[in-house]
């Protein structure tokens, strides 16, 4: 099915199951420990062996030689496979750095060996005995120092846009702002580290892994191993968080496959926590410059956003200016992104790539600008709202209700009680309130599914879609139940298996809308098959309460299925509605903070996020996504930073003691409100993404609240106390 | 982790003797730090002597009016003990400011004193570290040093001691009671127990090989307001950037030990005379000869500001 014209009324609009607050259908499996994550797969009859990775001890150079003699003779060792043994491999399409193979070291903790042993402990102990002799080369690791050497990337990365004459308009503007902001490297820091089990059967290999994108991994694993894609069977039914860190094939799957081949045994490999940070990918740091010019009435006349980020040779941009191309009006505008070559671990997508760090800067700048023109920051945003793509005004937004989010949020949060800067104090706490807009584009990808109806009237959905904690199982079951007119208890969902139709996968907040649309398409096929079998006109067949009805005939689905059952399979493809209409999601964040007047410690007191993201398929799982994103934003605002050692070229704080994500005590009462809306341009589900929206802008709202509390404006994340205490009142 | 042998000690004396006879042996109590270090092969004992079963888990009143805290008393139990909460509130508050509930259930009194630094370079065997590999150099100097020490540092090491509990013990003038391999006992004032790094940062305490901590003694209560103020980036489960352990009397006199700024719990008794004059004067004495890095210079201000907040709370 191809979605080419805006959705009209369809069976989803019945909202008997879709849109209902249904608890996760896999919740009991998870809370009772029966949901099997990659490393936990265990067949008692299978003689698993255990692989432990060895990472490069340098950031850049070559390996002259490796000595594995001691490791090979250590107790329990079955095999040692080194990067020199396997030699240089073809690289997967989605990888920038090599995962394994060859003598080149491109970054710290790049995998250089896997040691396979009878037990995990034996493998780990032997891995410490692997010796490598390096020819270390000089690398570049400091974004700020290398900024002048930044280059414009190729046009495929869309580095530049310009409309009107920004420079002239900025020069002549009545009120201007010209500021720089920085965001640090960040880690996905998901709960479940990357892990895989590989088992060969002849020239075929089955890999249980933790992957957001089954088909991408399968293709890239085939390329890296040099085997036919058809010989690889990938399974990833449960994933303990990904945040973009599991979008692309990682070393655990490659090492498990090589290790299993060498040991001739199924092999389990999990990346140790420091490898999650220095062996895999991260969100790259940015330096951003924002210039805004406005008239006295608050209308923006000129806006420019430039960003610098770094990556390994062949890598890409952190697209931090993207939202600025779309979020606010202004006739004269320019954006530009430049790329620095850095020999740090690979930079790549992390939850809301582009918008997350971009809004961390832009939404401080907007707060600063509102103050300069003497307007409330909400009013300033409303004045500069746009209902069309400001770079291409012929493209309207499919649906945009940023103003509604801001107004409703202001009302719910008590924004009118916002104190004057630095004026409200409760005991030792300076209290402030902040606001920021949330914005994230709505993406759709092709997504396939197969839906079966059996003689018991049970509907089973099969798709390689993944559930990374988001609730995919549940919303897919809701979609099938709504389409087939059955209760959710009559639906079974099977995910994350490469034998199933290829789906959108999970990432870029495209998963929920795309994958349920794929299930919608497959259900239409199944409905047609049922109608055809019964001799019904599929146009007027009604599916409800487990029965299919047409005119005065009605047949229970179980009976319609017959002994052989019926199947519908299809893939949702997308027309050009996303080209003719800008599809985005919007929101508003409101935050109240307390800043300790003596120590500068910031503690969040209240958070509210209002989201306008199309139809909400399930308010429980959607809320869970948004509060998780708000929490991630709190970490980004206040504590998360991968500390770069610019001499040795690695992230120093590579564990969860050093890389501080929020703990429960950091997160106060969180409220989430969804605007009641639908977007018929986006899909037959009329839904949009929401999994990343909640992160976009929240850090700036926190930072703006800190400014409101203290009068100290910090433009360099994270906003730690050392950046505040110099501006706080004397307490000694 | 390297393979190791394991024994359960039958007595305090046997434990000390076994440890003295094997230079590659280590005592294990809660194991909350040692096991992590063994997994990373930063600690590589070939033999572990389990001291959990020696009956050293009691808290008793001493004839002098103080408390004798068994070496194996768990942090949770110590923090919750009625006498500790009533008479040594500083200790209870410092303990619950540290780690997590799960870790405190396991961690012991002696083990807490002996925990090792959380300097990230110490934890990465690929990086030079004089504490891990004497003579290899210090990566933190000139590197990522935001968490590191500002006083008592050397050119060989700027690591901090991470304990919250030890800050309280230092302010309370605790004494560490030990048994040596020859069976003799000694009492080490907490002030002398931990060493500054100097050029031997790998030697962290004055304990001799095999010497075994049996208890920590607290003198009789000194009254005053007991305040533990731990300053950190997140609200829980983080090591202190700076912590202040203070006992302040109504006349403004008192004691202050500071955490997060040195290789040992930091207390400058001479500076305490300045406390009645306020935080600035006292902090000046506490931080005399401070040698911060670019990244941790803020700790100098932060000590003064945190102490100011503590004194204000004491007056409150």
Image: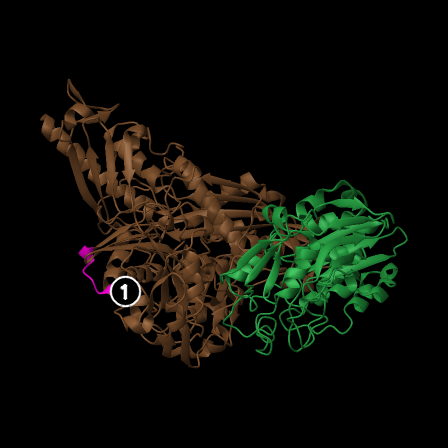
Please say if B26 is above or below A456.
below
Residue A537 lies in the magenta stretch: no
As rendered, which of A34 and A651 lies closer to the eye?
Answer: A34
Q: At which x and y percent is residue A50? A: 37, 57
Who's brown, chain-wise?
A
- Residue at (15%, 20%) from the top-left corner? A551
Dot 1 crowding, Cα within 10 Å, few <14, some 14–19, many 20+: many
Residue A85 pos. (x, y %): 29, 72
Left or right placement of residue A151 versus residue B70 in this view: left
Q: Residue A54 at what x, y percent from top left?
A: 41, 67
Which of the 4 image quarters holds residue B165?
A: bottom right
Give the residue at the far top of this rendering.
A552
**Could you tell me which quadrant the C terminus of chain A lies in?**
bottom right
A201 relative position to B122: left or right: left
Quadrant of res B233: bottom right
| Relative horizontal placement of residue A529, taking residue B276 as reference (left or right) | left
Give the residues in magenta.
A225-231
Q: Is residue A732 visible?
A: no
* Residue placed under numbered mark 1 in the picture: A92
Q: Residue furthest right?
A: B251
Tell which subunit mark 1 falls on: A
The N terminus of chain A, quarter of image: top left
Chain letter, colour green in render: B
Residue nearest the viewer, comparing A492 with A57: A57
Q: B48 and B75: which one is in front?
A: B48
């Amino acid at each position: 099915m191809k979605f080419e014209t805006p959705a009209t009324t369809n069976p989803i609009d019945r909202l008997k199951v879709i849109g209902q607050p249904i608890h996760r259908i896999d919740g009991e499996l998870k809370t009772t420990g029966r949901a099997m994550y990659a490393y936990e797969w265990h067949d008692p009859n299978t003689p698993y062996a255990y692989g432990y990775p060895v990472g490069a001890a340098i950031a850049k150079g070559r390996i002259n030689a490796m000595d594995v003699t001691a490791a090979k003779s250590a107790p329990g060792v079955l095999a040692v496979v080194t990067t020199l043994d396997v030699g240089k491999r073809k690289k997967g399409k989605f990888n920038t750095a090599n995962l394994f193979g060859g003598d080149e070291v491109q970054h710290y903790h790049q995998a250089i060996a896997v040691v396979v042993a009878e037990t995990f402990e034996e493998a780990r102990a032997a891995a410490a005995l692997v010796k490598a002799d390096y020819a270390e080369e000089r690398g570049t690791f400091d974004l700020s120092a290398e900024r002048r050497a930044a280059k414009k990337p190729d046009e495929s990365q869309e580095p530049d846009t310009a409309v009107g004459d920004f420079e002239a308009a900025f020069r002549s503007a009545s009120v201007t702002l010209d500021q720089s902001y920085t965001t640090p490297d960040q880690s996905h820091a998901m709960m479940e580290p990357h892990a895989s089990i590989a088992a060969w059967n002849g020239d075929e290999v089955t890999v249980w892994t933790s992957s957001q994108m089954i088909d991408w991994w399968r293709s890239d694993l085939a390329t890296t191993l040099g085997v036919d894609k058809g010989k690889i069977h990938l399974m990833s039914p449960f994933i303990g968080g990904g945040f973009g860190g599991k979008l692309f094939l990682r070393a655990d799957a490659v090492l498990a496959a090589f290790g299993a081949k060498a040991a001739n045994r199924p092999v389990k490999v999990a990346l140790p926590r420091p490898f999650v940070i220095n062996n895999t990918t991260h969100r790259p740091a940015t330096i951003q410059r924002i210039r805004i010019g406005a008239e006295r009435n608050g209308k923006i006349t000129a806006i420019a956003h430039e960003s610098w980020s770094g990556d390994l040779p062949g890598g890409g941009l952190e697209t931090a200016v993207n939202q600025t191309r779309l979020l606010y009006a202004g006739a004269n505008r320019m954006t530009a992104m430049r790329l620095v070559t850095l020999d740090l671990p690979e930079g790549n997508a992390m939850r809301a790539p582009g918008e997350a760090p971009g809004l961390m800067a832009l939404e401080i700048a907007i707060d600063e600008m509102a103050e300069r023109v003497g307007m409330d920051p909400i009013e300033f945003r409303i004045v500069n709202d746009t209902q069309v793509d400001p770079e291409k005004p012929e493209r309207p937004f499919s649906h945009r209700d940023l103003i509604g989010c801001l107004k409703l949020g202001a009302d719910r949060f008590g924004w009118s009680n916002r104190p004057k800067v630095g004026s409200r104090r409760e005991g030792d706490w300076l209290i402030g309130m902040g606001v920021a807009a949330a914005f994230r584009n709505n993406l759709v990808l092709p997504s396939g599914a197969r839906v079966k109806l059996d003689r018991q009237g049970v509907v089973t959905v099969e798709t390689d879609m993944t559930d990374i904690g988001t609730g995919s199982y549940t919303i897919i079951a809701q979609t099938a139940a709504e389409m087939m007119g059955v209760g959710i208890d009559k639906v079974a969902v099977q995910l994350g298996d490469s034998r199933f139709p290829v789906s959108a996968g999970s990432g870029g907040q495209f998963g929920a809308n795309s994958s349920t649309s794929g299930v919608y398409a497959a259900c239409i096929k199944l409905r047609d098959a049922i109608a055809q079998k019964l001799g019904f006109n599929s146009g007027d067949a009604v599916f409800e309460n487990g029965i299919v009805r047409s005119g005065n005939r009605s047949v229970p689905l179980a009976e319609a299925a017959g002994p052989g059952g019926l199947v519908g399979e299809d893939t949702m493809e997308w027309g050009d509605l996303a080209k003719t209409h800008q599809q985005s999601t919007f929101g508003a964040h409101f935050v109240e903070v307390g800043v300790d007047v003596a120590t500068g410690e910031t503690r969040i007191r209240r958070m509210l996020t209002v989201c306008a993201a199309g139809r909400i398929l399930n308010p429980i799982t959607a809320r869970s996504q948004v509060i998780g994103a708000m929490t991630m934003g709190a970490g980004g605002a206040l504590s998360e930073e991968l500390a770069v050692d610019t001499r040795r070229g690695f992230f120093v704080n590579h564990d969860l003691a050093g890389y501080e994500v929020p703990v429960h005590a950091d997160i106060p009462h969180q409220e989430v409100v969804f605007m009641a809306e639908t977007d018929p341009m986006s899909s037959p589900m009329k839904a949009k993404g929401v999994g990343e929206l909640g992160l976009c802008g929240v850090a700036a709202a926190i930072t703006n609240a800190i400014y409101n509390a203290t009068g100290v404006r910090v433009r360099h994340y994270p906003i730690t106390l050392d950046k505040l205490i110099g501006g706080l009142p004397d307490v000694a | 982790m390297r393979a190791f042998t394991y024994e359960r000690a039958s007595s305090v004396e046997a434990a000390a003797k076994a440890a003295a006879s094997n230079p590659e042996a280590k005592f294990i109590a809660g194991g909350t730090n040692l096991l992590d270090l063994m997994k990373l092969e930063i600690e590589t004992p070939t033999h572990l002597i389990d001291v959990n079963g020696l009956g050293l888990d009691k808290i008793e009143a001493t004839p002098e009016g103080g408390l004798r805290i068994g070496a194996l008393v768990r942090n949770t139990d110590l923090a919750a003990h009625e006498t500790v909460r009533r008479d040594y509130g500083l200790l209870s508050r410092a303990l619950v400011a540290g780690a997590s509930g799960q870790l405190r259930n396991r961690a012991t009194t002696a083990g807490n004193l002996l925990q090792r630094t959380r300097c990230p370079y110490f934890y990465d065997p690929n990086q030079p570290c004089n504490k891990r590999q004497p003579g290899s150099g210090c990566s933190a100097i000139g590197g990522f040093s935001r968490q590191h020490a500002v006083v008592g540092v050397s050119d060989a090491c700027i690591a901090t001691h991470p304990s919250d509990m030890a800050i309280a013990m230092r302010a309370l003038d605790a004494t560490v009671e030990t048994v040596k391999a020859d069976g003799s006992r000694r009492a080490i004032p907490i002030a002398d127990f931990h060493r500054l790094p100097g050029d031997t940062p790998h030697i962290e305490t004055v304990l001799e090989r095999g010497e075994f901590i049996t208890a920590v003694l607290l003198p009789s209560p000194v009254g005053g307001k007991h305040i533990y103020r731990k300053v950190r980036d997140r609200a829980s489960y983080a090591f202190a950037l700076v912590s202040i352990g203070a006992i302040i009397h109504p006349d403004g006199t008192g004691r202050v030990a500071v955490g997060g700024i040195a290789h040992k719990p930091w207390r400058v008794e001479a500076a305490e005379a300045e406390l009645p004059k306020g935080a600035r004067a006292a902090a000046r004495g506490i931080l005399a000869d401070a040698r911060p890095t670019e990244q941790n210079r803020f700790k100098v201000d932060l000590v003064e500001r945190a102490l100011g907040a503590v004194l204000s709370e004491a007056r409150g």
